[in-house]
Amino acid sequence: MSTSSASVNTASLSGSTSRLLQSAMAACLGFLIVGFVGFSHLEVVHNAAHDTRHANAFPCH
């Protein structure tokens, strides 16, 4: 019985670790995108983000 309970505990641990890793990677990707768009000197990038915000009815200024 201890073998099956150990495998269940390992499976739940790897599942929570996987969710945590996925959440951390999503947050990093989000910060990279926002940082690139927010601090980009390329006018095309700024205008694309600006138009997208207005198209989604999100006030930006």
Image (cartoon, grey):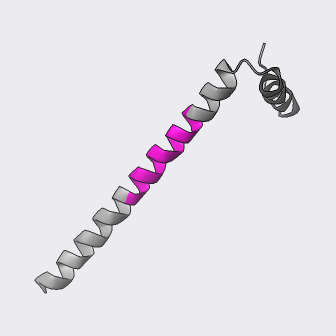
Q: Quadrant of the N terminus?
A: bottom left
The residue that appears at 40% across and 59% down in the rendered structure is: 18
The single residue placed furthest to the left in the displayed view is 2
**Residue 19 forms part of the magenta stretch:** yes
The image quarter in which residue 15 lies? bottom left
Q: Is residue 32 left or right of residue 16?
A: right
The single residue placed furthest to the top in the displayed view is 61
The residue that appears at 35% across and 58% down in the rendered structure is: 16
The spot of residue 50 in percent (x, y) is: 81, 24
Specify start and end residues of the magenta stretch as a single range.
Answer: 18-31
When the figure is inspected, residue 1 is found, relative to residue 7, above or below; the finding is below
The image quarter in which residue 41 lies? top right
When the figure is inspected, residue 26 is found, relative to residue 58, above or below; the finding is below
The residue that appears at 43% across and 56% down in the rendered structure is: 19
The spot of residue 46 in percent (x, y) is: 78, 23
Front residue of 8 and 23 = 23
The spot of residue 42 in percent (x, y) is: 77, 22
